[in-house]
Amino acid sequence: MSKSLTLNKIALRNITRRYARSLFLGGLVALLAFVLTGGSLLVSSLRSGTESMAARLGADALIVPAGYERSAEGALLRGEPSSFYLEPDLAERLSQVEGIAQVSPQLFIASMNSEHCDAIVQFIGFDPDTDFVVKPWLSQLLSGGLPKGQIVIGSRIDGKPGQELNFFGRKYTVAAKLEETGMGFDTSVFTDLETSRIALADYISFGGENAPPDADGVASVLTVNIRQGYDSNQFSRNVNYGFRKEGVGVVFPKTMISNVSGNLASLIGVTVALMVLLWVLAAGVLTVLFSVTVNERKREFGVYRALGAPQRYLSRLILTESLAVSAAGAVIGTALITLVYFLFSDLIGLSIDAPYLRPAGGVTALVITGGFALSLVIGPLAAAYSAGKIGRIATYAIMREGE
Amino acid sequence: MADIGKNRAIVGAAAVLGGALVAFGPYSLFRICGGASHHTMADGAVMEGMAHSAETGASMICKYSAAAELGIGIVIALLGIAYLLFSNPYAHLGLSFGIGLSSVLALLVITVLIGVDPKPMTCATTTQPAIILISTLLTAFTLVNVVYLTRKIKINVKVAHA
């Protein structure tokens, strides 16, 4: 029983017979798919992280000890462990500064500091009575509020509600687990101020770095909402000049967000430009390669023409070959970057110097599909020119053969 | 014959490299917590359920996983060396099965059978994803090779019968 030699079979045999060339073309498309999809996933994760951060940093200003402005930003953005404190009477006096509409203390404790294992857990204590930053989005998880002595953990900390976790030698029950936020909150533990002061006392007894002498009344930052219509620069001056002897600093989360957004916009611009450049370069290289290949295969195409194959058949053959090679490369490149993206998501989030959040499933699927499609079409597009003139080349080859 | 030679070199080298990464990666490139490490003040901030070695503060779960991966990785690398030495396609087929199944075992050890420490420990964010990636690629690669070898053997048998 004989099997018919269809166009697809001829294309497949041509690909496998010239496997070195096919491997190179497929590899190029795979690299393109890897970079295009990876770049797009990175950009959408950074954008998603910045949006999440803007939604969660609800205070107009943060008052911190002088010199710890960057630490406060690091703790919020990247979950960098920070332990810094305002003395109790200073926190009390700062609460009276002119221009304040709402004020609430927060306590930061860096819970882990290991030489080789960079597992970072930031303990954040907030005052349930005065807080206006954490409570609004925490209430979505705990309608009845956070029970005293219990904790809410970030998405990158293993644990589930009801489980007991041990911090500084004391057990705390997990009341809820946050959704991923893409910022420092993912490696943070939230609890009420009273409980966090118990943890701070334990931290002091463990000889923690930069620990205050006493846990009573201390706070790390004061989250502030500035009075409606009050100039934020004037508020900053009130704090800086009024407490220049004690040394305090003011951080404006909105400035922080706009700085991050500005950096992100530049990064997105560069990434998109690089991706376009790479796509054009790859298309150029593939066009040249297909053109050279078609020239090399003049005799072969001449034989097809001599056997009665119409010009359109030869064009379809070259397009089918290019599509098959492109498809294989695009599948491998996209699959590999998808695997890397999902497996190393936590590591990228922890190491990157910006809010990083995996976008919603639909957006991720769309980005991956887009990267795949852009890589898939490059082969047939690059081969289109050669496919168009293949009939003429073949005829010419037959004529030369006859001379 | 040339095809078999190239296949031997590519698959054998991939298995040796993959096996070496599975075996020694957790101690070098994507290091687990522990080994020479020691926790400083933070020993009190260890999560419930994590077993820690008294001398080093290193996690026992990660150490067990890394030790198991060391053994499995060495087996994969040795199978890769055997693949380089033999030229019989039937032997290659058997060795491919061995490499593939060992890779699946490497994957299961780090995810299900032993596992790793809770996030955000380095073991969970770096070592585990790296081993999953390598073992998945190795499994997929050997699967493709098994299909290739099976077809090759069938063609050879047909030619011999003809």
Image: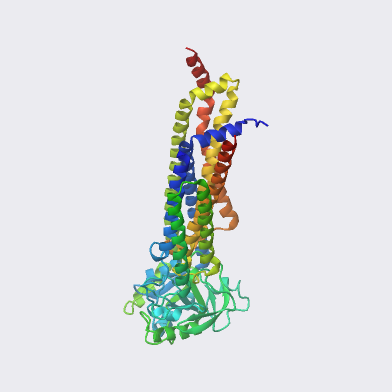
Residue A356 showing in the rendered view: no
From this view, report whether residue A363 is shown above or below residue A66.
above
Give the colouring mode of the picture.
rainbow
* Of A258 and A7, the residue lying toward us: A7
From this view, report whether residue A199 is shown above or below residue A47.
below
Q: Residue furthest top?
A: A403
Counting from the top left corner in percent of width and height, residue B93 is at 53, 50
From this view, report whether residue A70 is shown above or below residue A51.
below
Residue A2 showing in the rendered view: yes
Query: Residue A114 sits in which quadrant?
Result: bottom left
* Of A207 and B36, the residue lying toward us: B36
From this view, report whether residue A395 is shown above or below residue A189.
above
Counting from the top left corner in percent of width and height, residue A61 is at 45, 70
Counting from the top left corner in percent of width and height, residue A34 is at 48, 48
Q: Which quadrant would the N terminus of chain A be assigned to in this image?
A: top right
Q: Residue furthest front?
A: B161
Left or right of B108? Residue A233 is left
Query: Residue B32 sits in which quadrant?
Result: bottom left
Query: What residue do we see at 37% from left, 78% from top?
Result: B40
Counting from the top left corner in percent of width and height, residue A123 is at 47, 77
Query: Residue A67 sits in which quadrant?
Result: bottom left
Q: Residue furthest left?
A: A245
Q: How many marks?
A: 0
* Of A366 and A215, the residue lying toward us: A366
